[in-house]
Amino acid sequence: MLNIVIFGAPGSGKGTQSTNLIEKYKLAHISTGDVLRAEKAAGTDLGKLADSYMSKGQLIPDELMIDILASVFDQKTKSGECKGVIFDGFPRTIPQGVALNEMLEKRGQKISAVVSLDVPEEELIERLLNRGKLTGRNDDNYETIKARLDVYYNQTTPLKELYEKDGKLYSVEGVGSVEDIFARISTVIDSVN
Ligand code: B4P
């Protein structure tokens, strides 16, 4: 199984690139952000709780996210038709990274590659402000974007060291056209596939 983690700051293009990657490589898409937004839209208790963190640019507590992960993974891979999974927005903390490794190990699998999209902060802010204008997403406003970036630098980037040590980290320039970036990521995936 091809298990790809797509890694990067908010607005780095994780969701955008995942949409194309799942088509090309026949992967299931696990976007924890999408899972939480769907819960919010359905008005569930989890959705209400998640929104109270997301609207402030904070992460949902690890225990909750880790619980959700295994059930979403099993549900998305049960048909047996997909050739692997793209993890979009998970892991975001070291405990989530450890939990992902353990979950895959239990199922006789491992991470194939971690693709990190590098985008300068000014561009991230511009992209997210634009998306906020287009979609009205309540975490795409300047104050919340700044909080999300702080969370990314403090809680998420330490994962890079972990994956670098494992020899799994591939940094990709995340600026340019969506197609060019897709081609760069494809080169990485082809090299581990
Ligand atoms: P996510 O839904 O994961 O959202 P994101 O990181 O903000 O955005 P993403 O990176 O997918 O967006 P994209 O660049 O594709 O998380 C939202 C929130 O959910 C988090 O803040 C947190 O509260 C919570 N959450 C999620 N997972 C969690 C976890 N594991 N643990 C705890 N909490 C969790 O797109 C951004 C914009 O850029 C788009 O408008 C796009 O069109 C544009 N764009 C993309 N590529 C471009 C390019 N090449 N050039 C120009 N624009 C581009």
Image: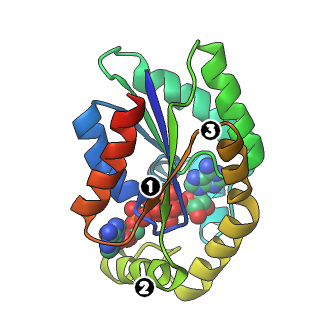
The vertical placement of 103 against 65, above or below, is above
Q: Which residue type does callout 1 highlight?
A: Ala
| Camera-nearest label, 1 or 2 | 2
Judged from the image, the secondary structure of the residue bearing numbered disc 3 is: loop
Can residue 45 be seen in this snapshot? no
User: Which residue in the protein does label 3 denote?
Assistant: 167
Name the one closer to the observer, 114 or 76: 114
Q: Which residue is mark 1?
A: 41
**Circle 2: is it few (<14), some (14-19), or many (20+) Cα within 10 Å?**
few
For the residues marked 1 and 3, what is the alpha-carbon distance in whole angstroms? 39 Å
Indicate the secondary structure of the residue bearing disc 1.
Answer: helix
User: x, y percentage for residue 177?
Assistant: 25, 69
Q: Is residue 140 above or below residue 31?
A: below
Q: Position of residue 86 (x, y in %)?
A: 43, 38
| Mark carried by residue 60 | none
Q: Is mark 1 within 8 Å of ligand 1?
A: no
Q: Quadrant of residue 133?
A: bottom left
Q: How many tags in the picture?
A: 3
Residue linked to disc 2: 126
Q: CA distance from mark 1 to mark 2?
A: 26 Å
Residue at image position (36%, 76%) is 131
**Amino acid type assigned to the residue bearing label 3 in the image:** Gly
